[in-house]
């Protein structure tokens, strides 16, 4: 089964006291960072929006932070 890793940057964080909404996009090429350029070649465009309700995670994500996002298939369930 295929696996994929993307490198995503937090663009915005919207906080309302109950949840946080992260808007992320794939890192872009043209950077002085060789790793960013490598990721941009294989995943040049991606967007991800996540709402976090877990208050223990609030404040842990900020604009400009970067994260690896791994996509691992879930085995078929019977």
Image (spheres, rainbow, N blue to C red):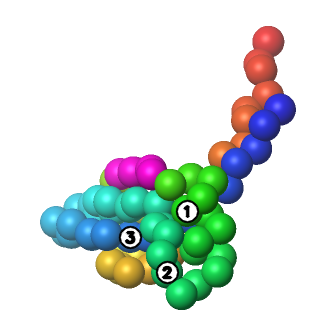
Q: Looking at the image, is 70 positioned above or below residue 64?
A: above
| Residue at x 33% of width, y 62% of height | 22
Could you tell whether 21 is left or right of 54 in the image?
left
The tag on residue 40 is: 1
**Which is nearer the eye, 38 or 62?**
38
Provide the residue designation for mark 2.
Answer: 31
Quarter of the image with the C terminus is top right
| Residue at (44, 80) in percent of width and height | 65
Nearest to the eye among marks 3 and 2: give it: 2
Q: Which residue is mark 3?
A: 10
Residue ID at (40%, 76%):
61
| Coordinates of residue 18 in the picture (x, y in percent) | 23, 62
The front one of 26 and 31 is 31
Q: Which of marks 2 and 1 precedes in the sequence?
A: 2
> Can I make out residue 33 in this image?
yes
Q: Are marks 1 and 2 in contact (CB under 8 Å)?
A: yes
- The magenta span reads 45-49
Q: For numbered disc 3, what is the local secondary structure?
A: strand
Drawn side of residue 46 relative to residue 69, left or right: left
Separation of residues labelled 3 and 2 (CA atoms): 16 Å
Give whichever of discs 1 and 3 has the lower sequence position: 3
């Amino acid at each position: 089964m295929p696996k994929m890793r993307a490198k995503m940057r937090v663009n915005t964080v919207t906080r309302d006291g109950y949840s946080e909404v992260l808007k992320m996009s794939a890192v872009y090429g043209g950077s002085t960072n060789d790793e960013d350029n490598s990721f941009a070649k294989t995943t040049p465009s991606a967007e991800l929006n996540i709402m976090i309700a877990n208050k223990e995670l609030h404040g842990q994500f900020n604009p400009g932070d970067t994260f690896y996002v791994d996509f691992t298939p879930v085995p078929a369930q019977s």
